[in-house]
Image (cartoon, rainbow, N blue to C red):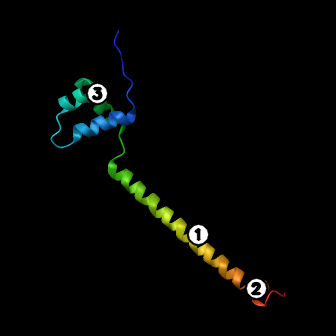
Amino acid sequence: MKHHKKWSREKILEIIRACEAPGANIEDICRVYGVHVATFYRWRKRFDEIGTPPDRQVKDLEAENQRLKELLAQRDLELDAMQRVLRKNSPRHSSGGTP
C-alpha cells in the first residue's frame, strides 16, 4: 500500500515557485522536498489550468487595500476636526456657558 502525503495548496505553490526560479533544477528541488518529479509536473499542470493569482495581482490588491486604509484614516481625521469645531462653536461654549 502506498503512503500518500497530503500537500497543502501553499506548499505546492511554494514548490512550483522554487522550480520556476532562474537556474532551478527541478529534479534537485523535488528531491529536497521529497516530491516525485511526475507529481511536480502534475501539480504544475493542474495549477496552470485553474490559474493561480499572479504576484502582480496580489501586489495590486495590497496597494489598493493600503490606499483605502489611508482614505479611511483621512476621513476619520476630518470628522474629528469637524466635531471639535462644532463643539467649540456651539452656543453653550461661545457665551461663557449660559444659553
Residue at which label 3 appears:
42
Query: Label 2 to label 1, Cα distance in Å?
Result: 24 Å
Q: Position of residue 45 (x, y in %)?
A: 29, 32
Q: Amino acid at mark 3?
A: Arg
The residue sitting at 17% across, 43% down in the picture is: 22
Q: Secondary structure at mark 1?
A: helix
> Label 1, on which residue?
76
- Does residue 76 lie above or below 44 as drawn? below
Q: Dot 1: few (<14), some (14–19), or many (≥20) neighbours within 10 Å?
A: few
* Nearer to us: label 2 or label 3: 2
Specify the quadrant that holds the N terminus: top left
Going by the picture, which residue comes out furthest to the left?
Answer: 23
Viewer-side residue, 69 vs 42: 69
- Dividing the picture into quarters, in which one does residue 29 lie? top left
Indicate left or right for 46 with 73 as reference: left
Residue 47 rendering spot, x and y as whole percentages: 33, 35
Q: In front of the other: label 2 or label 1?
A: 2
